[in-house]
Image (cartoon, helix red, strand yellow):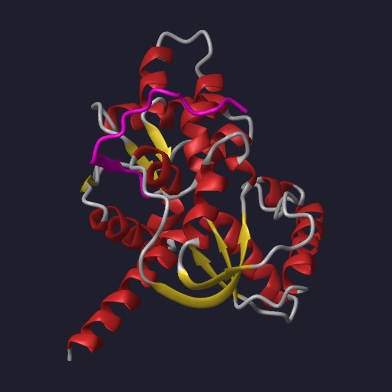
Amino acid sequence: MSAPATNRPTGKNVQLMATCLCDAVFDDTAIATVEVLEHLGCRVAFPEAQTCCGQPAFNTGDWPAARKVMRHVVRTFAGDEPIIVPSASCAAMMFHGSLLAFENDPDLPAVRQVGGRTWELVDYIVNALGVTTWPGRFDAKIAFHRSCHSRGTATGAAALALLNSIAGLTVVPFGEPEQCCGFGGTFSVTFPHISKAMGNLKLDHILATEPDLIVSIDQSCLMSLAGLAAKGGRPIKTMHIAQLLRDALRASEVTSAGREK
C-alpha cells in the first residue's frame, strides 16, 4: 500500500471527513472527533455535501462508480487544509486506493491533491500537531485493534503513544495482533464464512486477555467484532479511539470541577 505523502499540510484549520458509517450509524464517533480536535485548538469545517470515500465500489471492482464518488469527494473537499478522517480505512482509500482508480486518468492530479492532504485522526494529532501524550483519565484495561489499512502508516504507533500516556489506562497485548478482524467491507458479504472464522480467531486472542473493552481506529472493525462477539454469546464493549480520548478529557474536567469545590 502507498504510504501517505510526506509533505501533507499540518495547520489547525481542518476539514472533517466523518465517514459514511459514522454518518449513518455511529454519529457519536464523529462528534467525539470534533471535540478532540477542538480541544487541540483546531477550527473544524464540515463540508455538508460529503458522502462516501468511494471504497465500497472500489473494493467490489466497480471502479467507474468509485471514480464517480471520488470526483464528488474532490469537489466537496476543495482547498488546501488538512482533511481529517477518523478511520484508517477511509484515509487509505483517499491516499492509496483513489490513485489506483485514477491511474492514467486526466483527473489524477486533482485526486492526488486531495489524497495528499488526508490524515487519519491520531496520525494527525501525533505527527502533524506534535502531541504525544494525552491528558485526562480513563480507568480501564483495553485491547487495541490496529486495523489492516493502517499498515505502512504511522497511525498504529501514534495510537499506542496516546493510549499508553493516559492515566488509569492499561493496554494489554494479545496473540496475533496483526491478524485481520475479517470484516474488510464487502469481503464480509462476499465471503461470510471466511470472514466469521477470521473474526472469531481475533476475538479468541483478544478475549483471552479479559479486557474491559476493545478500542480501534476504525469503527467498521469494531462493528464487526462487536456483532460477532454478541452473536457468539460473549459480548464485549467496544469504543473508537476518538471516543476514548474525548471521555478521558471529560473525566479530567469532572475531577477538576470536584477539586475546585
Q: Position of residue 112 (x, y in %)?
A: 42, 19
124 vs 259: above or below = above
What range of the chain is rendered magenta?
A: 1-18
Which corner quadrant holds the C terminus? Answer: bottom left
Residues 186 and 160: in front is 160
| Residue 135, image quadrant | bottom left
Q: Quadrant of the N terminus?
A: top right
Q: Nearer the viewer, residue 14 or 70?
A: 14
Q: Give the x, y percent position of residue 191.
A: 77, 49
| Residue 212 vertical placement versus 102 (above, below) | below
Q: Main secondary structure of the magenta part?
A: loop
7 versus 148 height, above or below? above
> Residue drawn at (35%, 56%), measured in percent from left and top?
33
Q: Does residue 172 belong to the magenta stretch?
A: no
Horizontal and vertical percent for residue 9? 31, 29
Q: Quadrant of residue 63?
A: top right
Residue drawn 38% across and 56% down?
23
